[in-house]
Image (cartoon, rainbow, N blue to C red):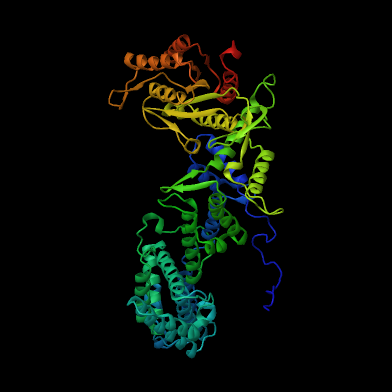
């Protein structure tokens, strides 16, 4: 018998709340819905939500602002020439102390020494090198000069290996030898890796032997190489940020320090290996003006400290770029969570992970899917957005209207007659459960089933309750997709209206049929999912003729339904189909375009369809055209404010579906 699994508990150490409810994206979809109903695509709406954030999580914009604040703080940390200034100060200290020691001495040797000190070059690197063999009389001067050499050696190593300056405090010759051995082993390992050799065991041995120099404890050679390369790149960036004179002076001082340590060759090998391993980093000012940092602080920084600041700035620059998401193929997965933690703390990582999880959960919970690389809404999401749009429409309806529109028996085909019949494929009537079960029991008894055995339903057992046929409507909503709708700010309202009407019909009048037809230079039928993700089209042409033609074909499928055509447009017809089916555009409208469009109006009129036009502009040619449509068809013309379009369309649908007799 296997033992039960054990569990161990400990204090919570930060991060997401372990007792929080499962990820709920309903609220996020509702926030996206506001953008989608304003006319944006699902991708644009999601990107906008990621930038703004959700109710309880920061968005990318706020994270970027926090990163920018850290960048300003890093720049305010101090000046980059601190080591150079410190060397100059120590050099002056040594010279002054030596002169004080020489002054009382009347000998010619003292005067010669004073002359040598007075004629030292202004370049601190040349002065330090020229004093290398000088026999100091002053103990204070000797200490100051020795401090220069010690400072340079530690700062140069610290600029390549983070924390080395502190690690080498009071370093003995044996300690410096371990540094030399470490660099030799490191270069050998990097060169072996560049040749394609397996270095896993070599890396493990290296860390066992030299791990003390790497307190960040890298877990792989790739991780170690990345850290060293970024720091070396920051050191290069530091040198480019100095003036030409400062750069030359500091480079000479560093070269002298490496020669004194016997590490000049090893440092050159390391620099070459790191450049080869990470050629994508900023090694030579290839990023142009942005490669030179302007530090704004007053305090002088040592070489290692300055490298720290520029390494942090480089990481913050990369992080800001990833959070900006404005490059081809951008993804939140590109954002380094470790970099976010270092820059902004654990809570910011939780915000980032929540944003990364958002898109995955929208797909997993069935609100979004991908097709051909494009993000689109699912029918489930469209239903939710449509319900939201419909709620807004009902809020705007006149209180004297129909009032509440809940239908508790939605889905039934009519009033029950009391009789039933055998179920046939395609029936929408409700099942008669009692008679269905009775048929199964009788059939099983006739087959000789034992008493008390399970009752199993067969297809032939099912019966449906007969209902009286209700009045149904076939509705074609024709929506203008031309670019002028976006320019006037009415496209999003038209989309919202179409989704609201779809929600109303499918949930409360399921026996009715709705077809949404979009038209610009040509027309096409739109399913609700396509409509929700659609943007206005940057094409010329308002081909109402083609839209009316498609509407007639759809209405012909429902000969017993009340035909209703609703047209939402902001311009007169300016396009029509040629005989070969290609669209023809001309502005202002050609007589041929108007004639062909009115011919389709006449066809629908003979079919008994009512055409009501919702006119979103008062341009004289449009007004003249729609008045002619109303005269020929007997339908009505509305000029609603864009904000009230949904209310007008929904009210008109509910009025029209009652049939002509009810309206008379």
The front one of 243 and 183 is 183
Q: How many marks?
A: 0
Q: Position of residue 620 (x, y in %)?
A: 44, 13
Q: Residue furthest bottom?
A: 174
Foreground pick, 296 / 33: 33
Q: Position of residue 382 (x, y in %)?
A: 55, 39
Give the camera-side residue of 66 and 381: 381
Q: Residue at x 46, y 74 (%)?
A: 224
In the rendered structure, the answer to whether residue 248 lies left or right of residue 652 reads: left
In the rendered view, would you say 431 is above or below 497?
Answer: below
Task: Give the quarter of the image for residue 133.
Answer: bottom left
Quick one: quadrant of the C terminus? top right
Q: What residue is rendered at 50% in x and 53% in y?
A: 323
* Observer able to see residue 499: yes
- In the image, 514 versus 483, the foreground residue is 514
Which part of the image, by quadrant, shows the N terminus?
bottom right
Residue 411 appears in view: no
Q: Position of residue 493 (x, y in %)?
A: 53, 29
The residue under the point 40% across, 59% down is: 291
As drawn, 430 above or below 289: above
59 sits left or right of 520 in the view = right
| Residue 379 against residue 338 in the figure, above or below | above
Residue 219 at x, y = what percent? 50, 75
Looking at the image, the residue that sits furthest to the left is 580
Q: Is residue 237 above or below residue 541?
A: below
């Amino acid at each position: 018998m296997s033992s039960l699994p054990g569990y161990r508990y400990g204090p919570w150490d930060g991060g997401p709340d372990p007792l929080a409810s499962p990820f709920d994206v309903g609220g996020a979809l509702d926030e996206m819905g506001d953008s989608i109903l304003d006319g944006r695509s699902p991708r644009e709406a999601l990107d906008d939500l990621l930038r703004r954030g959700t109710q309880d999580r920061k968005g990318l914009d706020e994270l970027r602002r926090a990163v920018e604040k850290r960048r300003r703080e890093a720049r305010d940390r101090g000046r980059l020439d601190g080591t150079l200034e410190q060397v100059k100060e120590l050099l002056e200290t040594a010279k002054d102390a030596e002169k004080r020691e020489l002054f009382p001495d009347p000998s010619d040797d003292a005067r010669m020494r004073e002359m040598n000190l007075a004629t030292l070059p202004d370049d601190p690197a040349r002065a330090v090198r020229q004093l290398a063999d000088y026999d100091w009389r002053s103990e204070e001067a000797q200490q100051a000069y020795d401090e220069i050499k010690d400072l340079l050696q530690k700062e140069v190593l610290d600029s390549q290996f983070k924390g080395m300056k502190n690690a080498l405090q009071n370093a003995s010759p044996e300690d410096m030898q371990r540094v030399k051995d470490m660099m030799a082993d490191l270069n050998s390992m990097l060169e072996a890796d560049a040749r394609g050799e397996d270095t896993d065991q070599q890396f493990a041995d290296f860390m066992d032997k030299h791990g003390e120099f790497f307190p960040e404890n890298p877990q792989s050679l790739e991780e170690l190489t990345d850290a060293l390369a970024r720091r070396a790149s920051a050191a290069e960036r530091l040198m480019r940020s100095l003036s030409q004179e400062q750069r030359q002076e500091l480079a000479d001082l560093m070269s002298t320090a490496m020669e004194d340590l016997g590490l000049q060759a090893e440092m050159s090998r390391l620099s070459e290996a790191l450049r080869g391993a990470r050629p994508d980093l900023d090694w030579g000012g290839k990023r142009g003006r942005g490669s030179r940092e302007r530090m704004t602080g007053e305090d002088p920084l040592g070489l290692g400290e300055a490298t720290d600041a520029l390494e942090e700035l480089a990481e913050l620059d990369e992080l800001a770029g990833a959070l900006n998401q404005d490059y081809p193929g951008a993804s939140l997965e590109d954002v380094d969570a470790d970099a976010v933690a270092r820059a902004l703390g654990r809570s910011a990582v939780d915000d980032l992970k929540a944003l990364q999880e958002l898109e995955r959960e929208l797909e997993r919970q069935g609100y979004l899917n991908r097709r051909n690389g494009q993000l689109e809404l699912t029918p489930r999401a469209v239903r939710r957005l449509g319900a939201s749009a419909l709620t807004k429409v009902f809020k705007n309806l006149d209180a004297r209207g129909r009032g509440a529109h809940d239908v508790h028996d939605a889905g039934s085909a009519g009033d029950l007659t009391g009789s039933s019949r055998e179920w046939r494929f395609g029936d929408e009537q409700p099942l008669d459960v009692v008679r269905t079960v009775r048929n199964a029991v009788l059939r099983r008894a006739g087959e000789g089933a034992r008493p008390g055995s399970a009752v199993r339903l067969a297809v032939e057992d099912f019966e449906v309750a007969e209902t009286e046929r209700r009045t149904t409507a076939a509705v074609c909503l024709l929506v203008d997709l031309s670019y002028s709708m976006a320019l006037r700010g009415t496209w999003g309202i038209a989309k919202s209206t179409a989704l609201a009407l779809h929600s109303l019909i499918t949930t409360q009048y399921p026996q009715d049929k709705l077809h949404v037809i979009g038209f610009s230079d040509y027309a096409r039928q739109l399913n609700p999912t396509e409509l929700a993700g659609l943007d206005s089209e940057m094409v010329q042409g308002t081909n109402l003729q083609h839209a009316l033609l498609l509407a007639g074909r759809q209405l012909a499928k429902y000969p017993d339904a009340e035909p209703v055509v609703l047209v939402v447009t902001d311009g007169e017809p300016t396009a029509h189909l040629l005989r070969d089916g290609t669209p023809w555009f001309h502005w202002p409208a050609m007589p041929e375009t108007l004639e062909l469009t009115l011919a389709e109006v006449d066809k629908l009129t003979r079919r008994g369809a009512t055409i009501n036009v919702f006119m979103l502009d008062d341009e004289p040619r449009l007004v003249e055209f729609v008045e002619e449509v109303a005269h020929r068809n007997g339908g009505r013309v509305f000029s609603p404010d864009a904000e009230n379009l949904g209310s007008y369309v929904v009210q008109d649908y509910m009025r029209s579906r009652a049939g002509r007799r009810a309206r008379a």
